[in-house]
Amino acid sequence: MKKVIVIGSGAGGAMAAHMLAKTCDVTVLEAGKAFEPFSLPMDKLAMFRKTGVYFDERLIQLLFPAMRIDREADMVMVYGRGVGGTTTLATGNAIRADEGLKQIGVNLDEEFAQLYNELPITTDHQRYWTKITKQTFGVMQELGMDPQPMPKLLRPNSCKVCGHCSMGCPTRAKWDARELLEGINVMTGCKVTRIDIGDGKAKRVHARKGLQHLTLEADVIIVAAGGYGTPDILRASGIDCQPTLFVDPVLCVAARMDNARQDHQLLMPFVSKRHRYIISPYMDWLSFFFNRKWYKPMDGMVSLMIKLADEEQGDVRNGHMEKKLTAMDRLHLQRGVDECRDVLLRMGAKPEDLFLGTLNAGHPGGMLPLTEAEAETLHAPQLPDNLYVCDATILPKALGLPPMLTIMALAKRIAKIIAER
Ligand SMILES: Cc1cc2nc3c(=O)[nH]c(=O)nc-3n(C[C@H](O)[C@H](O)[C@H](O)COP(=O)(O)OP(=O)(O)OC[C@H]3O[C@@H](n4cnc5c(N)ncnc54)[C@H](O)[C@@H]3O)c2cc1C
């Protein structure tokens, strides 16, 4: 039986492992631990905001180790570290976002069709929409912004509408990639440092597990440590990546609105697709705790998220991002801010009550982008034959859209290619 090592258990890694476990002996190496949702009461924690105790977003990981934060200049990067990767922090949005892949000749119709069959994807959550969600939807319709209910990886009947999707779903109503890993050998707390490559083959994986140094061999090695983790592993193994990092920056525009209760609604219940960005209602917990402008009552504000497809330039080195928004990124972001302001004002907010959130991002990728020449193989020529990359790192372009479904479609195809070899 072919022996396969998968590095990383997020969207790409878990799907590749799930597919290959049918025919191969698969081991997943995951740097983080088993995932536990954040369980401390938000309202109690909120009482300490004005003491200044929440002065740096990086403190989050002390209370919630599955959420990792990096900061570069005015932008905060959020990513997952634990079984299920960043999918455990996701808000469950399931959008097909393969325009960039189509442009280079990758057709994933079959894989998307399979995903729609296999995963609990639904728009049947409108019965949970709160008054403020319906009002926002109506205003965006009036403004011609064509809002559409968001397809969600969700079992609506188990959803408690707690509004904490991005801190782990307490009821597991929200699907995440852990469901793909059932029955698969996952070694947790196992951080891969490099891969030995020789004679055109990937030979051994080196990892740290606590104080131990592990060396593991396999016939096929799949690197799926995410857009933030994979470039470091590849470079430490002698394979260069490109400074073409995208992150899909997010900025929330909010307004004080008494009793809006946006803190208890499904995050991102609907979406309006604009040119190079989307707009969607989103209670921005990061800004709520760490941004002084957000020191308002938890139930007394309405917030709209702008998620941007940024220009592909930037880098990750030693787990730290080097990324600045370009003039064009800022221009698109400003257009989004202006549109959100219009929506909030029409909903009755006063201009002096509007405020912005912290610029953040959660979709790193693109540093080993697929090209037209690789449309069939999904394998970059600088990689040894038996080494694949299977995560957001290979996306050719920023999406400005939720990437999970597209990464899983790619992972399915890559697993089929490996299985057929
Ligand atoms: C708050 C938030 C909400 C989001 N909501 C959505 C959403 O609703 N819909 C959507 O489509 N997308 C969403 N995303 C983005 C989505 O979750 C990610 O784009 C997706 O999970 C990326 O998949 P991946 O396989 O590239 O990496 P990840 O899912 O990040 O998985 C990478 C894994 O590799 C592990 N790893 C890293 N380094 C190493 C190492 N050296 N050795 C071993 N293991 C390692 C990590 O611990 C992690 O488990 C959201 C992101 C955030 C931050």
Image (cartoon, rainbow, N blue to C red):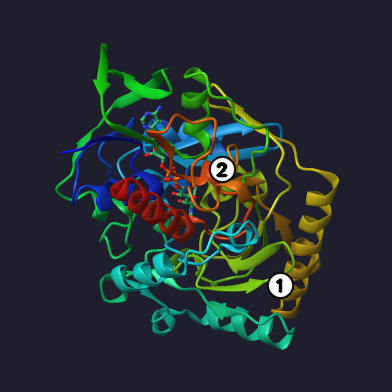
User: Percent position (x, y) of residue 232?
Assistant: 51, 25
Q: Is 227 above or below relative to 89?
A: above
Q: Is 12 above or below relative to 281?
A: above
Determine whether label 2 and label 1 are within 8 Å by CB.
no
Q: Residue at x 51, y 56 (%)?
A: 403
Q: Is 210 above or below relative to 287?
A: above
The reply to whether residue 136 is in sight is yes
User: Percent position (x, y) of residue 173?
Assistant: 29, 65
Q: Residue at x 69, y 62 (%)?
A: 277
| Tag 1 residue | 344
Q: Residues within 10 Å of mark 1 (few under 14, many from 20)?
A: many
Mark number, residue 364: 2
Asked whether 136 or 195 is in front, the reply is 195
The reply to whether residue 37 is in sight is no
Q: Residue at x 52, y 18 (%)?
A: 238
Q: Nearer the viewer, mark 2 or mark 1?
A: 2
Asked whether 36 or 59 is in front, the reply is 36
User: Percent position (x, y) of residue 244?
Assistant: 67, 38
Nearest to N terminus: mark 2 or mark 1:
1
Q: Amino acid at mark 1?
A: Leu
Residue 107 located left or right of residue 147: left
Hey, which quadrant is residue 32 in on the image? top left
Helix, strand or loop at label 2? It is loop
Residue 118 located left or right of residue 253: left
Q: Amino acid at mark 2?
A: Pro
Q: Is 414 above or below relative to 136?
A: above
Looking at the figure, which quarter contains the N terminus?
top left
| Mark 2 lies within 8 Å of ligand 1 (Cβ measured) | yes
**CA–CA distance in space, label 2 to label 1:** 29 Å
